[in-house]
Image (spheres, rainbow, N blue to C red):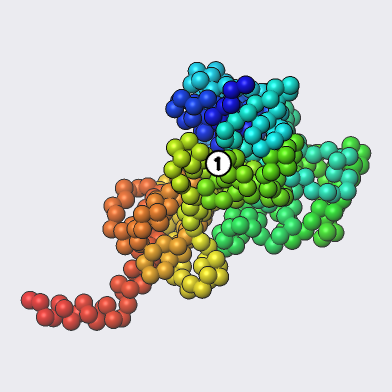
Amino acid sequence: MKRRDLVIIGGGAGGLVVASVASQLGLRVTLIEKAAKLGGDCLHTGCVPSKTLIHAARVASLMRRGSEFGLPACDPEVDLGRVADHVQAVIDHIQVHDDPERFRGYGCEVLFGAAKFIDPRAVQVDERVIQGRRFVIATGSQPLIPPIPGLETAGYLTNEDLFSLRKLPARLVVLGGGPVGLEMAQAFARLGSKVTVVERLPHLLPQEDPEIADALQKHLVEEGMAVHTSTNAEKVQTKDGKTVVNCSDGLQHEADALLVAVGRRPVVEGLGLDAAGVTYDAKGIRIDRRQRTSRKHIYACGDVCGPYPLTHMAEYQAGIVIGNAIFRVPKKTDYRIVPWVTYTDPELARVGLTEQQARDQGIEPAVLRFPFQNIDRALTDGQTAGLAKLVVHKGKILGASILGPHAGELIHEIALAMKTGAGIGDISATIHAYPTLAQIHRRVVNTWYGQKLFSPGTRSAVKWINRLVP
C-alpha cells in the first residue's frame, strides 16, 4: 500500500483550501468527507443560506418601508417555501466550486465516508485503510444542544434544518442571543414570525462591546422582536400541539417552532483521536501556533480546534497548515487583528480590543464615537441606525466596533490600518469619496482632532500667529 503524502479529514472551508493547493502542487492527497457532498457547514447550513435568507428578509422589510422613500408601502405575502427554494438555488450555484470532480481533476482522491484513526499513521474509511505521511483534521463544529428537560421530546430546530422549513412559524422562540440566534431571529421576524429571543447573559452578543450590543438590542426591539436577557430556559413542554418554554424569570413563551442557537461544539467524536495520540478536550483539538496537534505530523484547522468559529479563520489557518505541512516553512498564527461580523440589520462588525479589554490590559484609551445619523449617505439610504466606536491609544487604533449599514465592509479599512500600523492621522488625511458610508472613518477620527483644534489654547495660538504675520 502506497502511503499518501497528505490525508485531509473534512471537506469544509479549511480542508478544501489545503486539498486544492496540495493537489495542484503534485502531492498525493486524499480528502475524506463524512457527508455526501463537499462544502461543509458554511455552504450548506451556515454562512451562505443564512445570508441569503437575511437578504430576502431585508427585501421584505424594505417593501413595508416603501412610504419612507415616497413609494407605496407593501406588506408582502411571504411563501417560505419559495424563499427556501431561492436559498437552495444560491447554494447550488456556489456548490459548483466545491464539486468533487474539480478536486479529482487536480489529482486529489475524494472519498465520502466516516474516517477514523486506527493508529497515528493510518485512518480507516469503511473497509479501506489509508496510510499517510501527514494528516489534517478539519471536521468543523456542530450545534450545541443544552440539557433542558423536555427539549428533545418537544422538538427543536438548529441551523442544520432551519433552512429546510417550508412553512413560516407564526411564533418562533430563539434560545441564544449570539450571532446565529440574532441573525435568524431578525430574519424570521421580518418575514412575518412573532419572535422571542431568550439569552442567559445580561447582554446580547456577550463577546461584543456592551454599549454597541445594547444599541443593537434597542433597534431589534423597536422592530418588534421580544428580547429577554439574564434568563434561562429551564423546561420545555408541549401543550395542545404548541411548544411552551418555561424560563427562570417566571415567564412562559409559547412557540410554533423553537430554534436552539446557544453555541457550537467541535466535531471530535468518532475520529479515533485517542488511537492517534491526539490531545483534545471539550473545546476541541489542542494545537500549537503552527496548527500542529500533539502529534506533530497531524494538523488541525477550523472550528474543530478554534479559537474562532469563523469561515475566514478556517481559511487563514489552512494557509498556516499549507506553510508548515506542505512547504515545510515554519509559519505561526497571529490573532491580534481578527475582524468578525454579526449580519443583523444594522450589521455589527468588530476588530481588535473593546474599550473594557483595553482597560483590562492596563491601557487607558481614548474612545471616539460618531453616529451614522450624521453621515449623509446613511441619510440618503434611510439607514441611520448605529455608530462607529474606535478605541485609540497614542494615535494608534487598538480596536473598533461598528454598528451600522454595511459595517462588515467598513471594518476592513480599520483592520488594514491596524495591520499596517497606520494611525488615526493617516485615516484623517486620506481622501474619502462623498457621499459614502466610509466617510464615517474620517468623521470619527476627526472628533479627536476637533477637540484639539478648537481648544482655547489653539484659538489663542491662531490669534497670535495672525497678529504676527501680515
Along the line of sight, which residue is nearer the eye, 414 or 56?
Answer: 414
Under circle 1, the secondary element is helix
Which quadrant does the C terminus fall into? bottom left
Quick check: 364 above or below 186? Answer: below
Answer yes or no: is residue 261 visible: no
- Specify the quadrant of the image occupied by residue 137: top right
Inspect this view and state whether residue 248 appears. Answer: yes
**Residue at the right extreme of this rendering:** 240
x 63%, y 28%: residue: 131
Q: Pointer 1: what residue?
A: 314
Instruction: Relative to 108, say whether 255 is above or below.
Output: below
Left or right, 86 with reference to 97: right
Between residues 125 and 89, which one lies in front from this camera angle? 125
Within 10 Å of disc 1 (Cα), the crowding (few <14, some 14-19, many 20+) is: many
Classify 468 as above or below 100: below
Percent from the top left, x then y, of residue 434? 32, 48
Amino acid identity at mark 1: Ala
Q: Nearer the viewer, residue 245 or 147?
A: 147
Side of 83 relative to 148 (left or right): left
In front here: 113 or 131?
A: 131
Residue 45, x across and y down, in percent: 65, 34
Quadrant of the image containing the N terminus: top right
